[in-house]
């Protein structure tokens, strides 16, 4: 399964089609839940198999960190209650806030402007079917986090909304919102690694023991 | 043909599926209360309700609205529309008036989701809607007034 | 354009409120006006003059010759008529006047809304229109009852015979009154008896503006109408060298591609195909001489221009010698950017050009200019052209285009495609489209006495003129000085013995135009900031310093004192807060703002409170005055945040994300206090804007010790080290 993830990641530049994934994996059953289940099992298996390698793990995290801190990722993992936007990660215009479930507030909900796909043209709202911020209970802040702080946070289910490392790997490998970072639309830069390389680094960090880089 | 339901009326429109909902509402259906202000989801003048949410129709392709409920200023139901319009009149809110349809459509979502909005709630709802004439202080007062009228009316 | 005569807004203002009274002659409809546009006169409609119609259903329709762009003029002028007519206010309606000389502005000599003068222009004329009609309705009733008119009175839409208790409604009297000869020289009411004028009155146009039925230019639809967008040159002054239309014409819905002197128009069944068609055009542009325009280099050029004297706008005493002899000289340089008006309704115009006539529907501030420009572009006689004024989705001066470009475009395209055409500007077209408030470079210096009092004041302004070379030049450009470039600086009210103000004209190129409060937008920032600098240099409280220098201006002092008192200038502010004030006279009114600000560590400015005081003389609708002050404050605060800049000849801003305007969460608490005044009537649409920016800059200095001499304000400028 982990090989399958990697294979999928290698084509991560193009939009991932869930229905196809479902068919490939397990026939006609609902794709999302199944893949998620499969992922957990796969990562656990590989985690057992992998060698604990503190240096390699930390190296992998530092490589992935460049992606975590890239505007495409960090803009939705802000330190405040508002998303960020733009290549300079300025606070999102129009006083947009996280809201109860991370999808905005009142007349300023994410999907009121952000469509399922990018609106064509410079400075037009980028789109994604899952457009949202982390929930206020587990805001998963990247902005301003050092590598050590971010790694510790990702390992602490108390601060990830109960997400395990496996689920975090799943998010970076499969969530359309994350995949969308590599199809950023007009005028927006892609993260510094390919999606495949990014997932490989996150996976390597976890498999090699999820060690926290020195502060 | 794309099937649309606007203000509880069914329409079948023959437009390119990427056409923004705004232009279908204004030009194809002929309801001009919804305004074009920026074309980039920056100003809120084009706000309509799509299944109750205050979407910016200038960046919403008409295909997204297919089979869903679209409500414009002309069809805003009285339960929220009347107290809002009455409050807007009582506070003499509009100047040029061009942005006010969008302002009212945004405010309607606020009043649906919270009975007695605070000033912060108003900021969190209304900051997406630009008024170049600067009627913001009156919009704020009108929202408070409409909320008060609503809770009085429903005994809350 | 030959109609443009007698244009002297400033001459008028100097002369006092009702100097233009002689033009009241226009009250009676000359035959020509009827020929141009009979406003749907039914047999049962009484039309005593060009400004009023009374229907047999009791409706009173006031025909308003000034454009409603948010300032509330439809309501204000209707109130004036209704007051003198003793109309039932609930029956009063408003209709936009057609373009016709009878509707010319009483001071400008053309039909134009601008200069915060609409009420001043019409005060006398609309009062007489109402009073005349009332006299005739009374005469008609008296004739029916066979009693003396003096025994009858009018009240709330009825004529009443006191003794008998008989009464007839205005609707019932409309027809008999229309058969009477006009009454002349009617007496106007004593202002003390006003029932409507002076009372806060709700606007007549609100109901239609809250239910989506109000019609703006962009909402006009004509049978068979097509929609066009234009590809305009990417650099001002550019021209299309070659146009490949094929890909645009291949887009479904695109009907025509038309080349005009304004750009290449894509004409389609609707806005979306037109916009897609425009994106598909392949145009090679000849960029012209502004292809290298760059804002930084332009500023260097202005600095160079400021090194030598300009045309003298005010000379009092000998400023140069006094400066040389001063104990202390303070000098400062101020820079202000180009600004776009950015009204919420993007520019648009519907034109229907036929071989024998042309109709134009648009929200314009300048009907006479549009009328003649449309006739010329259509190749028709003016009497074959009708201008239909819609509501304006904001004007701010943008819709008073001296070259009538947005109307000309539509007329040219309609003529070319032989169909009615609506030209729509996108927001990007608007932001990048020019006709900006000119960028300005100011050099100002003052000499202080040992006590800190200014003994000399020297102020040099470098900016473009948008009036030189137009028909307005003769009226507004005096001794080589364009008054709109030095207003607010040349007439600085402070008591300084030696004053020299001069102006250097910057080269033309970027299209520039008046923006709400015109030259005052930049002069007030400089004068009021610099005066604050002097107060601080003199270690004197800015309020006390101003008061002392305004000893001969009690009206100014009263406004300043009112703002300061209501603000609580004497009370200490909470820690971490700064306060500032500014005072400015423009358009016949005096406005002071006192503001309270904070600046975050990151340099983010927040304006928490603005207390405004205004003396605009007699007030028709106090609530409109308040609304205009609120709106002006929001407009003025927006000028702290945005600018138009150039790189490689191109405008760098596009839309509201990079040309930000104030939003709800940035809007301070606003208080407006109106001085009870019987002085001459001033305007209210513009005078609230000029003192906003300097009051905030002064408050920032009070808080941080940083003097901002350049707008917009950047967080970087205010960031704490």
Image (cartoon, coloured by chain):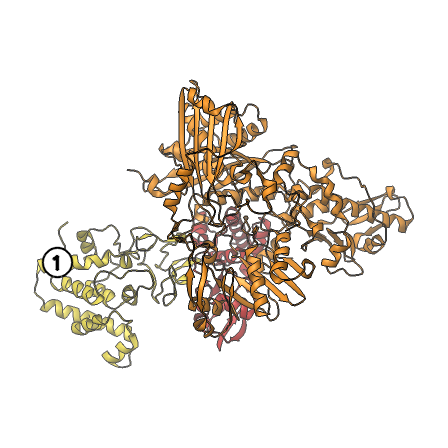
Find chain B in the image and tell me its colour. red
Nearer-the-camera pick, A101 or C426: C426
Residue C553, by quadrant, is top right
Q: In this rendering, is residue C472 above or below A35? A: above
Residue A114's spot in the image, x, y percent?
Answer: 38, 63
Q: Position of residue C493 (x, y in %)?
A: 54, 29
* Residue at the right extreme of this rendering: C146
Q: Which chain is drawn using yellow? A: A
Q: Is residue C451 left or right of residue C385?
A: left
Specify the chain shown as orange: C
**Residue pointed to by mark 1:** A59
In the picture shown, does residue C492 fall above or below B40?
above
> Does the image show residue C68?
yes
Q: Residue at x 21, y 70 (%)?
A: A9
Number of numbered discs visible in the structure rendering: 1
Residue C355: image x %, image y %? 65, 68
Left/right of residue C223 with respect to residue A52 in the rendered view: right
**Where does the image place residue C35, in percent across and percent down from the top left?**
74, 58
**Residue closer to the observer: A34 or C685:** C685
Q: Is residue C119 left or right of residue B38?
A: right
- Density class for disc 1 (Cα within 10 Å; few <14, some 14-19, many ≥20) is some
Can the viewer see residue C214? no
Seen in the image, is C440 located left or right of residue B142?
Answer: left
């Amino acid at each position: 399964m982990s090989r399958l993830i990697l294979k999928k990641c290698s084509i991560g530049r193009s939009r991932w089609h869930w229905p196809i994934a479902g068919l490939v994996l397990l026939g006609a059953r609902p794709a999302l839940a199944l893949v998620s289940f499969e992922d957990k099992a796969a990562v656990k298996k590989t985690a057992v198999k992998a060698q604990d390698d503190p240096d390699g793990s930390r190296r992998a995290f530092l490589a992935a960190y460049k992606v975590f801190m890239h505007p495409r990722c960090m803009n939705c993992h802000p330190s405040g209650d508002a998303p960020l936007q733009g290549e300079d990660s300025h606070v999102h215009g129009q006083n947009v806030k996280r809201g109860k479930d991370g999808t905005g507030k009142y007349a300023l909900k994410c999907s009121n402007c952000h469509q399922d796909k990018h609106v064509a043209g410079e400075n037009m709202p980028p789109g994604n079917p899952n457009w949202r911020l982390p929930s206020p209970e587990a805001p998963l802040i990247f902005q301003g986090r050092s590598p050590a702080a971010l790694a510790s946070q990702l390992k602490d289910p108390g601060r990830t909304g109960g997400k395990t490392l496996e689920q975090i790997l799943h998010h970076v490998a499969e969530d359309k919102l994350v995949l969308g970072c590599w199809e950023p639309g007009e005028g927006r830069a892609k993260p510094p690694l390919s999606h495949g390389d990014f997932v490989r680094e996150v996976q390597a960090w976890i498999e090699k023991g999820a060690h926290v880089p020195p502060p | 043909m794309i099937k649309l339901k606007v203000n509880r009326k069914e329409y079948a429109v023959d437009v390119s599926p990427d056409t923004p909902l705004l232009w279908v509402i204004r030009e194809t259906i002929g309801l001009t209360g919804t305004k074009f202000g920026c074309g980039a989801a920056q100003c809120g003048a084009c706000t309509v309700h799509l299944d109750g949410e205050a979407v910016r129709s200038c960046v919403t392709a008409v295909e997204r609205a297919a089979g869903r409920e679209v409500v414009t200023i002309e069809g805003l139901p009285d339960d929220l529309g009347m107290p809002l319009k009455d409050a807007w009149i009582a506070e003499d809110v509009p100047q040029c008036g061009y942005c006010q349809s969008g302002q009212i459509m945004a405010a309607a979502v606020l009043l649906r989701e919270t009975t007695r909005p605070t000033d912060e709630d108003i900021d969190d709802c209304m900051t997406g809607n630009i008024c170049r004439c600067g009627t913001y202080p009156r919009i704020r007062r009108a929202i408070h007034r409409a909320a008060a009228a609503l809770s009085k009316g429903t005994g809350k | 354009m030959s109609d443009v005569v007698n244009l002297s807004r400033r001459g008028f203002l100097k002369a006092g409120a009702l100097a233009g009274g002689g033009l009241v002659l226009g009250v009676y409809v000359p035959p020509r006006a009827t020929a141009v546009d009979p406003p749907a006169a039914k047999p049962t409609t009484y039309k005593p003059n060009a400004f009023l119609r009374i229907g047999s259903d009791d409706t009173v329709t006031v025909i308003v010759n000034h454009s409603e762009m948010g300032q509330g003029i439809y309501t204000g002028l209707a109130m004036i008529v209704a007051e003198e007519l003793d109309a039932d206010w609930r029956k009063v309606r408003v209709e936009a006047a057609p373009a016709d000389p009878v509707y010319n502005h009483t001071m400008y000599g053309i039909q134009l809304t601008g200069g915060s003068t609409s009420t001043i222009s019409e005060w006398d004329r609309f009062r007489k229109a109402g009073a005349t009609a009332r006299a005739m309705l009374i005469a008609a009733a008296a004739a029916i009852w066979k009693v003396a008119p003096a025994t009858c009175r009018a009240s709330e839409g009825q004529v009443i015979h006191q003794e008998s208790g008989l009464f007839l409604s205005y609707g019932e009297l409309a027809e008999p009154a229309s058969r009477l000869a006009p009454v002349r020289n009617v007496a106007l009411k004593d202002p003390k008896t006003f029932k409507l004028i002076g009372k806060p009155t709700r606007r007549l146009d609100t109901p239609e503006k809250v239910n989506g039925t109000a019609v703006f230019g962009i909402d006009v639809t004509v049978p068979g109408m097509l929609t066009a967008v234009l590809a305009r040159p990417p650099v001002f002054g550019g021209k299309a060298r070659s146009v490949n239309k094929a890909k645009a014409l291949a887009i479904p819905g695109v009907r025509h591609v038309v080349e005009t002197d304004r750009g290449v128009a894509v004409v389609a069944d609707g806005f979306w195909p037109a916009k897609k068609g425009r994106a598909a055009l392949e145009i090679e542009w000849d960029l012209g001489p502004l292809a290298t325009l760059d804002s930084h280099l332009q500023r260097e050029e202005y600095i160079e221009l400021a090194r030598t004297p300009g045309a003298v706008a005010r000379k009092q005493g000998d400023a140069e010698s006094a400066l040389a002899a001063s104990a202390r000289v303070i000098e400062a340089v101020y820079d202000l950017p180009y600004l776009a008006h950015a009204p919420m309704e993007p520019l648009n115009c519907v034109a229907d050009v036929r071989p024998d006539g042309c109709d134009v529907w648009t929200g314009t501030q300048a009907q006479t200019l549009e009328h003649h420009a449309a006739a010329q572009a259509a190749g028709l006689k003016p009497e074959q052209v009708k201008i239909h004024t819609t509501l304006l989705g904001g004007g701010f001066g943008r819709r008073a285009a001296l070259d009538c470009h947005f109307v000309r475009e539509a007329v040219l395209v309609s003529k070319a495609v032989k169909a009615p055409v609506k030209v729509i500007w996108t927001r990007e077209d608007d932001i990048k489209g020019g006709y900006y408030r000119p960028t300005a470079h100011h050099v100002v210096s003052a000499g202080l006495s040992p006590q800190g009092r200014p003994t000399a004041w020297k102020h040099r302004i470098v900016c473009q003129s948008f009036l030189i070379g137009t028909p307005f030049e003769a009226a507004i450009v005096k001794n080589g000085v364009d008054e709109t470039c030095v207003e607010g600086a040349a007439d600085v009210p402070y008591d300084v013995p030696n004053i020299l103000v001069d102006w250097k004209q910057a080269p033309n190129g970027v299209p520039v135009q008046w923006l709400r409060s015109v030259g005052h937008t930049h002069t007030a920032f400089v004068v009021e900031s610099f005066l604050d600098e002097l107060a601080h240099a003199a270690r004197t409280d800015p309020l006390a310093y101003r008061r002392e220098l305004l000893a001969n201006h009690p009206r100014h002092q009263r406004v300043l004192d009112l703002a300061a008192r209501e603000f609580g200038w004497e009370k200490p502010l909470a820690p971490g807060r700064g306060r500032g004030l500014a005072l400015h006279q423009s358009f016949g009114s005096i406005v002071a703002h006192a503001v309270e600000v904070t600046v975050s560590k990151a340099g983010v400015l927040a304006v928490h409170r603005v207390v405004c005081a205004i003396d605009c003389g007699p007030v028709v609708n106090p609530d409109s005055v308040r609304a205009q002050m609120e709106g002006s404050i929001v407009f003025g605060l927006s000028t702290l945040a945005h600018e138009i800049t150039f790189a490689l000849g191109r405008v760098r801003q596009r839309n509201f994300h990079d040309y930000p305007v104030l939003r709800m969460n940035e809007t301070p608490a606003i208080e407006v206090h109106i001085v009870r005044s019987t002085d001459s009537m001033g305007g209210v649409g513009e005078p609230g804007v000029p003192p906003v920016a300097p009051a905030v800059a002064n408050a920032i200095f009070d808080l941080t010790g940083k003097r901002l001499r350049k707008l917009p304000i950047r967080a970087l400028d205010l960031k704490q080290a």
